[in-house]
Image: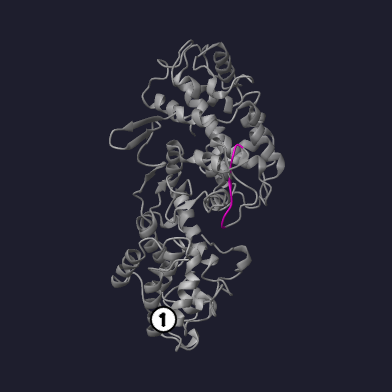
Amino acid sequence: MFYTSLLQDLLRTNSVEINLFLYAENKYVRPLQQLLASLGFFTFPEKQGLEQTNQIFDYTLLKAIKKFNQKNKISGDGARLKAYSLWRMLQCQEIIPYVKIIATYTDDTSGWQKETHFLYDPLQKVLSFLEYKEDTLKQSMERFCIYHGLIYPTDSLGDTIKQHLVSTVSTYMGDYFHDTEKSEKPPTDNEIAQTLSIIETPDNKISINDGQIQLVLTKKAPGVYWIGNEEVGMFLQRYTDKVNPEISKICLQVINQVARNEGKLDAINTYDQAFLSVGIFQWTLGTYTNAGELPALLKKVKIKYPEKYAIWFTPLGIDIAEETDGTTGFMTLHGERIVTLEQKEAFRRPFWAFHFWKVLMQPEFQAIQIEHAHDRFKNFYFKPEPKGLPYPLYQIITSSYGVALLLDMHVNRPGWINPCIGLAMADNANYASPDHWGTQEEAKILDSYLRIRATYTDGRNPPMTSANERANQIGLAKENGLLSRERGSFEYLTNQWEGFGMKGNRQIITPPPGYNPDDYPDIEQ
């Protein structure tokens, strides 16, 4: 969390007691106030903005520390904060997201003992926090139930067990713990920035350090950027267990090659007309007051990794607007939709780039980026009645090389694919239905398409950015055997052909099972 970094640095350097004591006035006091507020022991003055709170270790803060020590059975008067007290505070703070998951979980709890169950990890972490650390989750739960006089849940967890877990953890928290949204005021932009070391250098760089990790951004008016280091190909090698097994290896290679043109997993910029752009396909907040694709990406993270989302974004006040679907939407900040130019402009500030970059470095978030890229095909490639085309794209282009070229354009000029393919088909009007095409016919269509897309424009916007260079990069992958020009070589899902009974005719591609085009609106810009 944003206010814990400096405090963790004190623990690492064994300098807690020399910085946090009665009447101390330094940069560590405010984060300590924030930490105790999150635990329900401290409240900020109602008539005083958070950014105005004095950074002085006063008697109000001392009283909060004493209450925490009493609740957690820690000796000492708190006038000079002990390292163990701070460590325990951070431990309490880390368990909160998992407690909230258990408290609010309403789905089926059957099979909670299995590692695949959604509650397995939260339960294990909460029981460990409560010092029930047996070899298995089942044994830890048995000990907890025996101690509290509860019936061990052999199948479903039940509300009684969940309530006891939450109430037991609450005994270590403060009086305001169940009302933290009121007791802990949301951090302002200035408050977040003050927890970081931000230094502008003479060589047009901005160095940001939170005490744990450092990022050097390059200034480019009106924002900053970082081109990134994390490539999709390297991720696929290092984290095979995190990749969705339903995505075929061929499709992963297509995504990898397009990402080499577009961006790295940890790439970020805040200088272009979309205000904030991140990741391999540079998902954005949206131009002007339009919806953007970044909120849809965050929504996927929140659904698949809610406990991670609670750690990465909730403390910053970031959430997803209700109308956000799987393609586009809006973020919210402290409950307000980020839609106006003024609201979006605020995300150009360097510390926002830094915080999003830290999340972009997480393997789980990187895995979601790849899933989100995989879903993008549903917005254009599998559309049964594409605008301006006599056939769906999945019938026209079926080679992995050709599909990579289509995806490459879709992340750069999504609304222009159909016109360009339509013109390419007009160039080869003597060809019959795509059902009768072979590799040679598709290759002719692609040659025409590449020539057309290099200069095509709708009259309002310039042609596709670096169209020929991008095509050449994907062409290298074809020459190196990573992509194929053979018709029918693209595969969207693992074992797609066997699943559809098409071993004998790989040229035929069918939309994935359960696909509803209405759920995936066209992306026009």
Residue 50: image x %, image y %? Answer: 56, 24
- Using a 10 Å C-alpha cutoff, classify the residue at mark 1 as few (fewer than 14 neighbours), some (14 to 19) or many (20 or more): many
Residue type highlighted by circle 1: Glu
Out of 65 and 318, give the one closest to the viewer. Answer: 318
The secondary structure type at the circle numbered 1 is: helix
- Residue 333: within the magenta? yes
From the viewer's perspective, is residue 298 above or below residue 377? Answer: above
- Main SS type for the magenta part? loop
Residue 520, picture quadrant: bottom right
Residue 150: image x %, image y %? Answer: 69, 37
For the record, the magenta segment spans 327-334
Q: What residue lies at 40% left-to-right and 52% top-to-bottom?
A: 265
In this view of the protein, can residue 246 be seen by the observer?
Answer: no
Out of 349 and 166, give the one closest to the viewer. Answer: 349
Q: What residue lies at 53% left-to-right and 18% top-to-bottom?
A: 74
> In screen coordinates, is 160 left or right of 21?
right
- Residue 252: within the magenta? no
In this view of the protein, can residue 11 be seen by the observer?
Answer: yes
- Identify the residue position indicated by label 1 in the image: 442
Name the residue at the front extreme. Answer: 459
